């Protein structure tokens, strides 16, 4: 695959970023794309490694045929490369931008800390395909006469809808918000992925016969029972949006917010929409000229950091209860699995102060207004260490410690007592369905994505949407040609 000796001759190169001092002045994407010859050289590094762990299950959840499309890029066969990539992934321009790339962790060359730049190449293939006009609607030539409803238009819902539409079914997607995309549109900041990429896919899917109904909150504006009565199958892809309760005193102070309303507001501003949404109504939240504290160490917390800097925050501090990880992992102990090691996101690199092994004890304030965050150091069991308390000045604080399941208002409240749910050890609520047929406890009702597996990656949502689409197609038609 690629050039036989490429991995020995060519150094790993990744796409460069605009300087932090420049990129924090705008909300646009700031990655500087590689030229075609540079991408081709990086694809040439994909070695004939025998067992390509990048495929999965330790690498890519959708089982992208990475060595194959690297070889096609090396040979300048861009149309074949996007065709191959689309055979496993409906939206490579999404994953090429926002996926953390477990495939690169699983790359054989990662044993030498120089994995193939798979994520960069994937994005380049998708962008090149749009540039050359290779991505166009692919409507089904034969219609089945079956009608399927998809609740939710995040990555799982969109992937399933596209697959089902191409199988010949009449597909209707119902989205609570005013535009399609789910948290891809409203949760992920524009500086990580601009929203025209979602618009292009919606346009493609509309050309394939998929109908989008936006501004429809199923279970509130329209009963689930109506969908079940009017469709041969209903797929629930509602996502995981309920913030995990922090249980921190002072959370009701003015200036303390969950992360998602903040991110949704800013995305709606950039999309020239009203900042109030169905699920996240709130007063304007802005970080300009403020001291900001972000509680949490994950991607959502990092997105809050980057957004705050772009809004003009004076200082941003990120608190992580976990200990600071090592700079480098023990390869022989963890490869090809995702390693716990020190990672710095582009947002954190813009000037965030990161505090590790620190617990948030209390939000403190005066006259109902947040003035600081009281913290302390913790031991390896996350228990407070006496005498280590300190207060960080804060005008604004965001809680970004994850999500505990789908919104309870709507589908879940209407189907209460009928739909089997599971509560895991962290208190997260998920809809029960296996990953073979994706059926729930209700006849004609399937589920996929974060609402089933819990909060996870975009690439996992795409995988589940594709697999659920095949399961539905098989149930309706007796067999299916859709891939799993």
Image (cartoon, grey):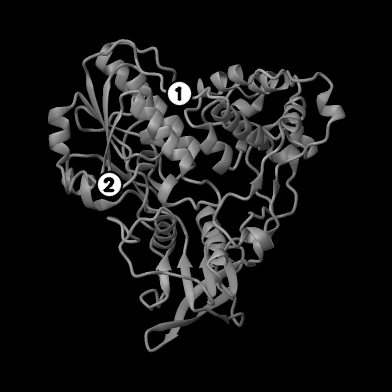
Under circle 2, the secondary element is: loop
Instruction: Determine the CA span between mark 1 and mark 2.
Output: 27 Å
Instruction: Give the x, y percent position of residue 18.
Output: 69, 53
The label shown at residue 176 is: 2
The label shown at residue 314 is: none
View extreme (bottom): residue: 367
- For label 1, count other residues whose C-alpha is less than 10 Å away and answer few (under 14), some (14-19) or many (20+): some
Residue at the (53%, 57%) spot, across then down: 303
Work out whether 239 lies above or below 204: below
Between tags 1 and 2, which lies in front? 1
Instruction: Give the x, y percent position of residue 76.
Output: 69, 20
Residue at the (34%, 17%) spot, across then down: 167
Q: Is residue 161 visible?
A: no
Residue at the (56%, 23%) spot, across then down: 85
View extreme (front): residue: 132
Under circle 1, the secondary element is: loop
Q: Is residue 185 left or right of residue 142?
A: right
Quarter-wise, where is residue 156 in the image? top left
* Residue placed most toward the observer, 196 or 66: 196
> Mark 1 or 2 closer to N-term?
1
Instruction: Give the x, y percent position of residue 245.
Output: 38, 63
Work out whether 438 lies above or below 239: above
**Residue placed under numbered mark 1 in the picture:** 136
Residue at the (76%, 24%) spot, across then down: 44
Quarter-wise, where is residue 8 in the image? top right
């Amino acid at each position: 695959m690629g050039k036989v000796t490429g991995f020995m001759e060519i150094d790993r190169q990744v796409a460069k970023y605009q300087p932090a001092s420049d990129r924090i002045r705008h909300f646009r994407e700031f990655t500087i794309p590689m030229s075609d010859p540079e991408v081709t050289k990086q694809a040439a590094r994909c070695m004939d490694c025998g067992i390509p762990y990048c495929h999965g299950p330790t690498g890519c959840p959708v089982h992208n045929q990475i060595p194959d499309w690297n070889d096609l890029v090396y040979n300048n066969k861009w149309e074949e490369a996007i065709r191959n990539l689309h055979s496993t992934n409906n939206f490579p321009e999404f994953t090429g931008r926002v996926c953390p790339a477990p495939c690169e962790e699983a790359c054989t060359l990662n044993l030498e800390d120089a994995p193939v730049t798979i994520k960069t190449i994937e994005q380049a293939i998708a962008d090149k395909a749009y540039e050359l006009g290779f991505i166009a609607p692919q409507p089904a030539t034969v219609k089945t006469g079956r009608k399927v409803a998809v609740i939710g238009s995040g990555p799982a819902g969109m992937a399933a809808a596209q697959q089902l539409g191409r199988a010949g079914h009449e597909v209707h997607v119902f989205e609570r918000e005013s535009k399609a995309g789910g948290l891809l549109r409203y949760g992920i900041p524009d500086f990580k992925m601009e929203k025209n990429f979602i618009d292009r896919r919606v346009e493609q899917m509309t050309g394939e016969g998929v109908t989008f109904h936006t501004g429809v909150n199923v279970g509130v504006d329209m009963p689930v029972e109506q969908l079940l009565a009017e469709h041969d199958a209903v797929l629930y892809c509602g996502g995981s949006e309920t913030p995990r309760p922090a249980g921190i005193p002072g959370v009701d102070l003015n200036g303390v917010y969950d992360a998602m309303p903040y991110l949704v507001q800013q995305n709606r501003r950039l999309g020239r929409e009203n900042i109030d949404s169905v699920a996240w109504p709130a007063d304007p939240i802005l970080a300009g000229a403020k001291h900001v504290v972000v509680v949490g160490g994950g991607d959502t917390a990092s997105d809050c950091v980057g957004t705050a800097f772009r809004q003009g925050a004076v200082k941003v501090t990120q608190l992580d209860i976990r200990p600071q990880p090592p700079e480098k992992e023990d390869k022989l102990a963890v490869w090809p699995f995702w390693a716990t090691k020190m990672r710095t996101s582009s947002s954190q690199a813009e000037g965030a102060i990161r505090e590790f092994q620190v617990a948030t004890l209390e939000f403190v304030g005066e006259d109902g207004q947040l003035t600081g965050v009281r913290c302390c150091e913790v031991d390896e069991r996350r228990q407070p260490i006496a005498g280590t308390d300190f207060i960080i000045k804060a005008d604004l604080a965001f809680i970004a410690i994850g999500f505990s399941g789908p919104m309870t208002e709507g589908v879940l409240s209407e189907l209460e007592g009928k739909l089997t749910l599971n509560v895991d050890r962290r208190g997260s609520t998920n809809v029960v369905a296996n990953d073979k047929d994706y059926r729930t406890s209700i006849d004609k009702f399937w589920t996929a994505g974060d609402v089933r597996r819990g909060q996870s990656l975009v690439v996992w949502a795409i995988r589940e949407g594709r697999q659920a689409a095949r399961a539905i197609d098989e149930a309706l038609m007796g067999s299916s040609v859709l891939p799993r």
